[in-house]
Amino acid sequence: MEAQVPPSQPQPPAQPQRPRRLYRSRSDRVIGGVCGGLGRYFGIDPIIVRIAAVVLLLFGGASALAYLAFLVLVPNEPPEGAPPPPARTDRTSTATIVAIVVLVLVGGPFLLVGGLAVAGIALPLAVLALIGLLVWWLVSGEGADGGAGDVARRAALGIGVLLVCFAIFAGGAWAAGVGGGAVAAGIVIAAGLALTVSAFAGGFRLLLLPVLALALGVGFVSAANVDLHGGVGQRDYRPASAADLRDRYQIGMGQLTVDLRGADLPRGDTRLKLKVGVGDALVLVPRDVCVASSADVGMGAVSVFDRDSGGLDVEWVDRPAARAEGSRVVVDADVGVGAFEVQHERNDRFDHRGRFDQRDSSDGNEGCGTTAPGRA
Amino acid sequence: MPKPDVPSLVGGLVLAALGVVLLLDRLDAIELSFGTFAPIAFAAMGAILVALGLSRRA
């Protein structure tokens, strides 16, 4: 039995295979379509590329520089139906990727050690440019399409919008801090209602971000309970006796120090009230005096001798009893943003980043009989 | 009646509500802290972003 050989089919003429090219994706993009394009080029899920980019951003920020390089060097995907761009070989795309990877590999170590001034400048600029593009995309809906000039222009516009919003945020915070919070809140309500009405006449989206920035500024001050009354600067008070103590010591912004080490304090309780808007409140007491303290700190830290607490909405209560026949200072502090400290000696307990330094554990509330744990 | 601009409508209502919360705090009717204000602020920003995204998708 003979095997039948099927008649040969006429084969269509072989199409010249288009070279695979690296584009920034139009259909799958968050900022500039870089991760979408890379995912398509390498045949992997763009989400994985995005996750890798974010992870790399946390380890030195090399991905921000790479992203910006891709944004500028890699063209946008041509629209559907558009004629293909002049032929470039697969080698060209690969060369672009290799060039960017080499750039990042060479620049990455410098970024990580922070030893090169250029890298130290380039990374913040790259991050700033990306933030600018994101802000401009939020405001106008324009992504990172077009050439390098268009991308740079949109990044600059986005940064400009961000700066204006920050200025409005600071203005709103200042207004609320000096007592104009109700007026600022009224402006937010009025602008919100105006926006709502404008929605039926085409809308006025440009108002969205500035009003949101104003509301966040007022809200920040309200949440931290910042009161900027009382002036700005550094105030040192050294009362000689309990009779010299004021009802309340207050400063708007700066450092407030009440030094009781030379004060003749009577037996029993001596009350002390402090209020600081933004800054530090420091109370210095003799070693034989017991200190009971309570403090509300919106954002910052409390340090009472060898104990401390920090973060947001810090509520501190520490009510130890004095020794028999001893003196006790009862401090009530209200700090918006900053720190409240009680110490025996003046020392810089906070380093330049606002963190506590290592302390001497023997430096405690020595004038008290028993120490009641009451820290919140 | 013309179709409203969704981001302006949602953003306006959200901002007006945020302003009312801030006004109540300033008038001591409520007491805001970061623990209460942060979720409100994030919800407001989220609502505006969702409205912007929906309008672009449409």
Image (tube, rainbow, N blue to C red):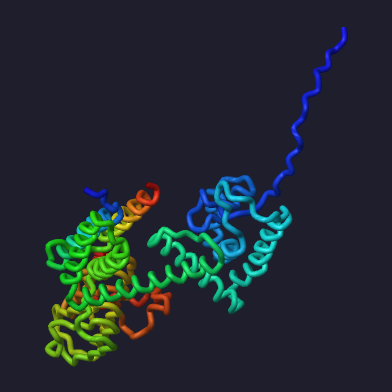
Relative depth, front residue between A125 and A345: A125
Residue depicted at x 73% and y 54%: A89
Q: Quadrant of the C terminus of chain A?
A: bottom left
For this orientation, the residue located farthest to the top is A1
Residue A325 location (% of width, % of height): 16, 79
State whether residue A109 is above or below residue A40: below
Q: Which picture quadrant has residue A362?
A: bottom left
Name the side, left or right, on which B48 lies relative to B22. right
Q: How many marks?
A: 0
Relative depth, front residue between B38 and A124: A124
Evaluate whether residue A60 shows in this view: no
Residue depicted at x 33% and y 68%: A310
Name the side, left or right, on which B41 lies relative to A147. left
Q: Which picture quadrant has residue A158?
A: bottom left
Residue A269 location (% of width, % of height): 14, 78
Q: Quadrant of the N terminus of chain A?
A: top right
Relative depth, front residue between A329 and B50: B50
Residue B20 location (% of width, % of height): 17, 61
Residue depicted at x 26% and y 53%: B10
